[in-house]
Amino acid sequence: MDIHQYLDQDQKKDLLRFLTAGSVDDGKSTLIGRLLFDSKKVYEDQLATLERDSKRIGHAGEAIDYALLLDGLKAEREQGITIDVAYRYFSTNKRKFIIADTPGHEQYTRNMVTGASTANLAIILVDARKGVITQTKRHTFIVSLLGIKHIVLAVNKMDLVDFNEDVFNSICADYKSFVTRLSVPDVHFIPFSALNGDNVVENSQLMPWYHGKCLLEFLETVHVGSDRNFDDLRVPVQYVLRPTLDFRGFSGKISSGIVKLNDELMVLPSRKKSRVTRIITTDGDTESAFTPQSVTLTLADEIDISRGDMLVHPENQPRLERQFEAMLVWMNEEPMDPFTQFFIKINAQTTRARIDQVRHRIDVNTLEHHQANSFSLNEIGRVLVTTNKPVVFDPYSKNHNTGSFILIDPISHNTCAVGMIIDKLSQADLYSRLTDNETRKLVEGGKSLIDKAELESRYGQKGVTIWITGLHGSGKNLAAYTLEKRLFDMGATAVLLDGSTIRSGLNRELDYSPADRAEHLRRVAHIARILNDQGIIAICSFISPREHIRGQVAEIVGKDRFHLIYMDASPDYCRSNKPELYQLAESGKLQHLPGVDEAFDIPVNPAIVLHPQPESVDVEQIIDYLSAKGIFPITQNRS
Amino acid sequence: MSDSSKINSYTLNNLRELEAESIHIIREVAAEFEKPVMLYSIGKDSSVMVRLAEKAFYPGKVPFPLMHIDSKWKFREMIEFRERYTREMGWDLIVESNLEGFEAGIGPFTHGSKVHTDVMKTQALLKALDKHRFDAAFGGARRDEEKSRAKERIFSFRDRFHQWDPKNQRPELWDIYNTKVHKGESIRVFPISNWTELDIWQYIRLENIPIVPLYFAKERPIVELDGNLIMVDDDRMPPELAAKAQMRKVRFRTLGCYPLTGAIDSEADTIEKIVEEMMTVTKSERTTRVIDFDQEGSMEQKKREGYF
């Protein structure tokens, strides 16, 4: 093969980016040094420096310390640890490679996360004498968190266990039982010795029982092309090109998918549509372009498009939301301050964002979930993020480019956290919309000058919430109004809140979808809470179909003040009371009717169950209950 | 699209993937910064970077200027090439030099490589950046050139004094770049960080990118100084050294100040021959740069001080 042929061939090689995780003790640097050395990436002068340094500051005695070849920065060389991510380059006749060489210790988790963000494959090193240890699990978790689909568990130092097959098999079995808990689709196992080069670039004679590929051959042949997403077209508009009055091009790197001439595209967030008239690539005009090309598109219509917008196919749209859940990795030395209004950068979009809630922190060693309100350096957890304006995104699991973001500190401008979006908020989830209890404590509010005892003695009652739940037509309102009248006659002070009154005014913009219903009930819960704080009994009549939402309402009101009453009426009874409503729902003309197309959870542990009768309801059970509990009339010495 | 760009219909080869990444980086800077500039060293890496910028804004004009820091000791052929290329391609070109240093007679022969590099390159660059108030400066450095570069970010933050702190680098994940800086702070951007020397040559070949003829082997007047082959480019070389010059067929693997840049004996007068030679050479690129020998970790030291 002459040089022209060689270059033509070389030009067609593809690129594999991989991560190496493990500590110096596992022989990681030795392995990389060997890959570079054996692919002749180490030059004579570097080798001379290496020999000189090996004797002076090396950790390998008189032998060449390959690790010194890699540790670039002075401080790192002196401490003998690889602190930062280092990128290494080598190529073979089959492929080009970029290695993200990352440090192994827990205090450098953020560096490993950084290296993993651009890798297609991860080599996780273990020492054959030690097997799968805590560090191995931590590395595997991070690799799966960042969505790397291919793992090689590279079992090093086989020479120190006499190349024993049983040792290798038992490590593989251990690892398999752990890795099944994480979603990594492709896992391989290779026994080797970096020091002597066994199974690194050539299959070793010393492990005849191993029939798989040696490490380098595996890296040269592993198929990663199908990891790319060609289904969902996403072109974030990075730059608007307007060289002349009659040319307007929209430049960006195709995050995923394929775009063709004449495709109809939709612009988000404006939702305007147009047709592709030109696709300009680095190779001139083309008929189609695909991820990860950087292109410039022109469109048939003059529509307003600016940086941060996203071009997509109208039939395949990403999310456009202000709230999402994400896995967050805290990268800053300063711990997270929950009040910060961060800058969020998500592809070409930049806006402000805050972390509304920390759902939990994950222990990277055990994968256990812990309660947390904030994060420190290297901590990882699940959070709820709210942005100032709607942002376009996809779940990270579907699309790494449109599902990842960074948070920038508004004062220091440091990148303080990075995140991977799980998805938009589950629609029926009310809890996330609550004011965080910790935050509430910190916000200084007004303080009433009337204390609770004074209120109770004036009204002769305790401020509680009587929450009546039940299907449409179960007789909630009748019970509520009867109770209100009865309490009034007895001298109590009560306020009645019911669905139709609240929805016709205060909550008139909200519909019956699970998300809006949750918001509706959140507001009602806060009104009830305010009334109770002022010593007044709140009678609330709401379908409130889901048990977990009722629980969340109870948390807002205060669990000790919340008394749940269930109108236990049969579906037939309810239908006979509201026949038109149920007919509409059953014919599909009306949506979101609990008991028909939405679930209704029967309360698990109500204070009282009422069995309604037509035209009348017996509220004496409630009166007796209030009296027995010392709520009304009040009993001062009982709680 | 030509067939060479694709392996099968929807796979990009290595070069096209690197190209897409570099263009994304260049556009990001143009979109996010008020006053970017592209530092132009006239070398092969700069030539590739400049071509990528031309492509990034095609069919428009590149929205930022090129700036060359002229140490006044560059090869004459470099300056000729600079003038011709930028004029033909319609680039805005800024040339800045440390005139105080020049008038004080600072030069490598009289003051040594360390002082010369500091005054005529590092200080000249910093003054020029301050003078024009650039908030982002592209550089053509590659991570595979030198050990300390392997850990530098693509968007490398500099404080008000242009200092780089290797221990306090911003995390850089996926292709999301933090472009926020305060007034007076700046970012150095390295769009070809992930390219190797071979990638550069391949791309020059693929795209027919013009480069300075000094890269190709030719008979040139050479003086051997401490094992380095130094070309006599003008009459500022001390006459007792210049007198020793002999014609040798040499070429340069990197270009800089002529007294500080060693040539190699070579027969390679085409890109193909250069690559062939490169694959059999046993010395890394930077050994022909005299400045690296000053002290251990010297490149890291220079970078902390603001050198590229």
Image: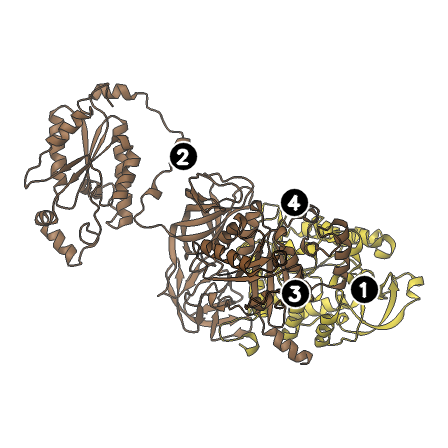
Query: Could you say which chain is coloured brown in the image?
Result: A
Q: Secondary structure at mark 1?
A: loop
Residue in the picture at 45% in, 38% down? A339
Residue in the picture at 12% in, 55% down? A583
Q: Nearer the viewer, residue B236 or A579?
A: A579
For marks 4 and 2, give the CA distance.
39 Å
Q: Which mark is residue B160?
A: 4
Q: Are tags 2 and 3 found on a single chain?
A: no
Image x and y of residue B276, in percent: 72, 74
Q: Amino acid at mark 4?
A: Arg
Q: Nearer the viewer, residue B107 or A182?
A: A182
Q: Which mark is residue B196?
A: 3
Q: Nearer the viewer, mark 2 or mark 1?
A: 2
Q: Which mark is residue B262?
A: 1
Label 4 near label 3: C-beta < 8 Å?
no
For marks 2 and 3, give the CA distance.
52 Å
Q: Nearer the viewer, mark 1 or mark 4?
A: 1
Q: Are tags 2 and 1 found on a single chain?
A: no
For marks 3 and 4, give the CA distance.
31 Å
Q: Residues within 10 Å of mark 1 (few under 14, many from 20)?
A: many
Please state the chain letter of the residue tagged with numbered disc 2 in the rendered image: A
Q: Which quarter shows the C terminus of chain A?
A: top left
Q: Amino acid at mark 1?
A: Gly
For marks 1 and 4, give the CA distance.
34 Å
Q: Nearer the viewer, mark 4 or mark 2?
A: 2
Q: Amino acid at mark 3?
A: Thr
